[in-house]
Image (tube, rainbow, N blue to C red):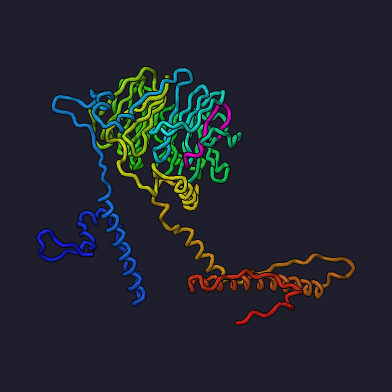
Amino acid sequence: MRKRKKDGKGYMDVTKRAKVGTGKLHKYKRGELNKGGIINKYDRVKFNQQSAKYQMASKQAARAEALLQEEAGFIEADEGESTCEVTQYDIANAVDITSAQKFFELKLDKFGPYRVDYSRNGRFMLMGGAKGHVAAFDWQTKNLMCEINVMETVKDVKWLHQETMFAAAQKQWLYIYDNQGVELHCIDVMNNILKMEFLPYHFLLATSSSYGRLTYLDVSIGKRVSCINTNHGRLDVMCQNPSNAIIHLGHSGGTVTLWSPNSQKPLVKMLCHGVGTRAIAVDNSGNFMATAGIDRTLKIWDLRTYKALHSYKVSAGPGSLAFSQRGLLAAGMGNIVEVYRDITKSQITAPYMMHSLSSPVANVQYCPYEDVLGVGHAEGFSSLLIPGSGEPNFDALEANPYQSKKQRQQAEVNMLLEKIQPEMITLDSRDVGKVDVKTLQEQIAEREKIIYLKPEKIEFTPRKRMKGKSKTGNLLRRVEIVKGRQLREEVQSISKQKEKLAKMLQAENTDGAAEVKEEKPFNVFDRFKRKEQA
């Protein structure tokens, strides 16, 4: 299609794609391929095709940036003023109606204090009161999904992989409910749960108990993967590292331990405070950790070096910490919520925002893809506006707030297909994309061992018999018979292993064209079968 220019001089082709700047291409560059494996012209053609795919992917990603119209922004104070003096009512009056509706409070003074959790796409919210009140709803449209009273203490609530199921840690056992409030499962092997964390890419629900046990439950198959006795007493301080799925636990001695389901001992043990640890939070990059102690100390740690970056003395010991997608840190101290900006980058002197509540704070959590901070307290729930806290643009293939029922079902299938096994949880998140060199070398060594396999030396000492049967000739004859029989069996076993290995190598060389068929034992009726044509 061609379109005439305004001045009427010639035409311009509007079907051509706009050029992409080198800066944007470098931003989305996916690295360079290794040219060391090029031997012949076929390898060169394959290399050029792969390079073209990489370049096209980077160009498409750079062009897609033009579609991301939303931008993150913070409140900027004038000279002589401070942003922490701006109240929530001032922000609600200054923003549009849609954003102002995200600032609200729920007065629920009979069943608190409340624990709060948002779904991965930031659309749905789950509340759990300590006196048994549990509710789930779409917090933007205020449409209630379910509301029940379990008639016993609720210590924590957590959404699972989708907004169709959630877990509730009740007085004695762990319960699984659907989004209509119907009880699906009662996990009686996990009791006295205090805190929970869900690992979405592994389908693991990690729980900590008052007995000092850290338990992992695979919700896709309903099986307990690991149960670790930490030997650190009551575990009421817990968080996860979103980058590598490592669980962080805080203890009464001021230490913080890092755990994986593959080890019965802590991967890392850090002495963060001289007194007990009250709260922990890890940012989305997985590089920084915030800890709070009983001595009113707030510390920022670099998890790459395990060293403290900054230390602050606050007005009260924070009982709850949370990092936003943009790196803002929220701290609940008594009945005050303080938000800190750029706390991991430099030493700060004042909070970014501050809000006072009518009751003590029990739990703070940021809503994904929204500039909203959810605060659960003794008299209900408060939704606060924190400009610049959420990621402005979402990836619909990762978490879609506007997904339909069909899209949600398809996303659930894709998540199950892309599920990461618990054995791959390590401190280094890059290990998931690496080749297991050790296992590969072991397989090569095993193949070589089979190729050069030789029969072992057979030693046999016959037992002496009575009545003249233990003569020298008879003993030697029996030794030869036994050795010959064992040698034949071992040679047959070695030959079968070598034949199987040869077929496997042949199948690998032909890129799977020739499939390796398992040898079936010979049957007397096989002679009636037709012979396979070559």
Outermost residue toward the bottom?
Answer: 534
Outermost residue toward the right?
Answer: 467
Pick whichever, 397 or 28, lies toward us: 397
| Left or right of residue 177: residue 434 | left
| Left or right of residue 107: residue 315 | left
Residue 271 visible? The answer is no
Q: Is residue 163 magenta?
A: yes
From the image, which quarter does the C terminus lie in?
bottom right
Residue 88 visible? The answer is yes
Residue at the spot 20% in from the left edge and 54% down from the top edge: 23
When asked about the image quadrant of residue 51, the answer is bottom left
Pick whichever, 169 or 301, lies toward us: 169
Residue at the spot 40% in from the left edge and 37% down from the top edge: 123
Vertically, is 7 above or below 524?
Answer: above
Q: Position of residue 475 (x, y in %)?
A: 79, 71
Residue at the spot 36% in from the left edge and 17% down from the top edge: 358
When asked about the image quadrant of residue 267, the answer is top left
Vertically, is 407 above or below 310?
Answer: below
Q: Of helix, strand and loop, which mostly describes the magenta segment?
A: strand
Residue at the spot 28% in from the left edge and 25% down from the top edge: 88
Q: Position of residue 149 (x, y in %)?
A: 54, 25
Q: How many marks?
A: 0
Q: Position of residue 304 (x, y in %)?
A: 34, 43
From the image, which quarter does the N terminus lie in?
bottom left
Q: Which residues are magenta?
A: 161-176
Q: Is residue 173 magenta?
A: yes
When asked about the image quadrant of residue 37, the answer is bottom left
| Left or right of residue 178: residue 477 | right
